Amino acid sequence: MNSASVSSFDGQALDHVLIFDTTLRDGEQCPGATLNTEEKLAIARQLARLGVDIIEAGFAYASPGDFEAVQKVAEQVGSADGPVICSLARALEPDIEAAAEALKPAAKPRIHTFISTSDIHLQYQLRKSRAEVLHIAEDMVAYAKSFVDDVEFSMMDATRSDPEYLYQVIEAAIRAGAKTINIPDTVGYVMPEEFGQLIKGIRENVPNIKQAVLSVHGHDDLGVSVANFLEAIKQGVRQVEVTINGIGERAGNTALEELVMALHVRRSYYNPYFGLPIESEKPLTHIKTQEIYRTSRMVSNLTGMLVQPNKAIVGSNAFAHESGIHQDGMLKNRQTYEIMDAQTIGLQSSTLVLGKHSGRNAFRNRLQELGFHLSEQDLNKAFVRFKELADKKKEISDLDLEAIVNDETRPVPELYRLEHVQVVCGDKQAPTATVRLITPDGKELMDAAVGTGPVDAVYKAINRIVDIPNKLIEFSVQSVTAGIDAIGEVTIRLRHEERVFSGHAANTDIIVASAQAYMNALNKLYFALHAVRSTPEQLEAATQKI
């Protein structure tokens, strides 16, 4: 059962799993989750604090925006003691060149190049023979190797490929210099036992497989991606490609938090597969689990992708108990119905944290305890919001503080600024909203509108000033804490042509939060319309993904 010697990383046998996070690349590809460069940087910094081993920062060739994001992450997060910074590239010279250029600032750069290997992809997408693809794979891995030492190679749709052909391609890629071989379940098709057998076959039939780390990438179309990965790990896989909250195309990617906590909670079960004693307490990943919840919330807020309440590990109900039998057991011993401590993932048990008489130092210290290290400018903004909230709420919880910080430090371009919103409504009169905005050129404009409800009236009034055609496709309100004075978080998504933009805001006044969330999304839309547009060739490149 000892699998520790089947993979190596920088010449060392692996007795743990490398966490390759693709939230900023594959995760961002799901509709509406588009992030700007500053948002990607914020997430990348948090991923580094979380302890991921590799950050796939984007697809550098896909667009100027993606190139800039990869370059900025490489520059600001890719230090010598930080994670490996990676860029995706098709097995094409221009893609590889763009990736290499964007990754130059990183101390530990990786180019991740890929090509399809399933017969259905070869026939209908690439229109190439197996021999041609084999030749391209070897040549392009060697080409990537001429720029960086760390090259990863993926075979798109590997789980629907002929295993005998996979063996040939993998052997050629390793011979050309690939240090990591990734096996993607691109369409979420395979079952756990099948995945395990595929990995086992690769280990047994590829002569040079011990010269590379075996990796897996998967989608959750049939709801078994975490199970697939755990089975692959048992068969010697030592890198997993995951996203925060499992975001990604279609049904999403394998969720980082679920995979990591499965290895953490069931460590004694998995230890033997790493050549470790059953009772070993050695972590099986480098993830700082106390940062999981905070990372989940950040990604949810910035992408606008809400986490379902019953989501494993990070859902709002994950540690809630309503059943009388469960509550009785919990009161007697928490282990009766909880297999992990909520604090393990960073959920704090503290309820009352600070009040209206608390000072700046106490506020700063509590934020630092919660893991927030703010600049003076961001601290000042957050402190003002805290004081405003303290005048409205008697008890301020850690979750309230987190909502304030996330709302005030969200890196969204403030081109239009909401100065004032006022609503008049009731059961006997038409809801009417008045708004005042500051335009990008500094002008102050005011308008009013009547709507079917107060939020509709606010949005119509804003649209009379910000004349950018769009369609609101989603509106969601969540309470941060319990109680009538709770902060409400509003998440919206709007569509302009074929693009979707999300907005998020938090306030004790839901109408104000709704207006701020709408302005958040409109500013993203306005910024995108005035940013440099991608060439048709670059946009086409972005559509061909693992």
Image (spheres, rainbow, N blue to C red):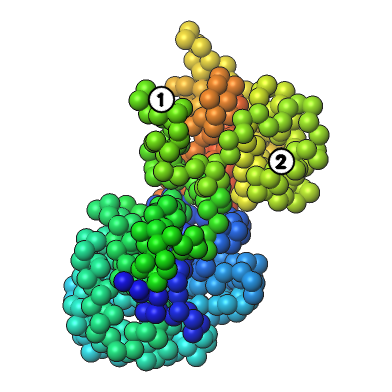
Residue under label 2? 366
Residue 283, x across and y down, in percent: 49, 61
Q: How crowded is mark 1: few (under 14 residues within 10 Å), some or many (20 or more)?
A: some
Residue under label 1? 328
Cα distance in 3D space between marks 2 and 1: 33 Å
Residue that appears at 35% across and 68% down: 273
Residue type at mark 2?
A: Arg
Q: SS at mark 1?
A: helix
Direction from residue 445 to residue 481 in the image, left or right: left
Residue 369, x across and y down, in percent: 68, 45
**In the depicted structure, whether residue 462 falls above or below residue 173:** above
Q: Is residue 301 visible?
A: no
Residue that appears at 57% across and 25% down: 486
Along the viewing direction, whichever of 87 and 541 lies nearer the viewer: 87
Residue that appears at 47% across and 21% down: 453
User: In the rendering, which numbered label is found on residue 498?
Assistant: none
Residue type at mark 1?
A: Asp
Quadrant location of residue 153? bottom left
Direction from residue 165 to residue 535 in the image, left or right: right
Q: Quarter of the image for the N terminus: give it.
A: bottom left
Residue 288, x across and y down, in percent: 55, 56
Quadrant location of residue 268? bottom left
- Total labels: the figure holds 2
Q: SS at mark 2?
A: helix
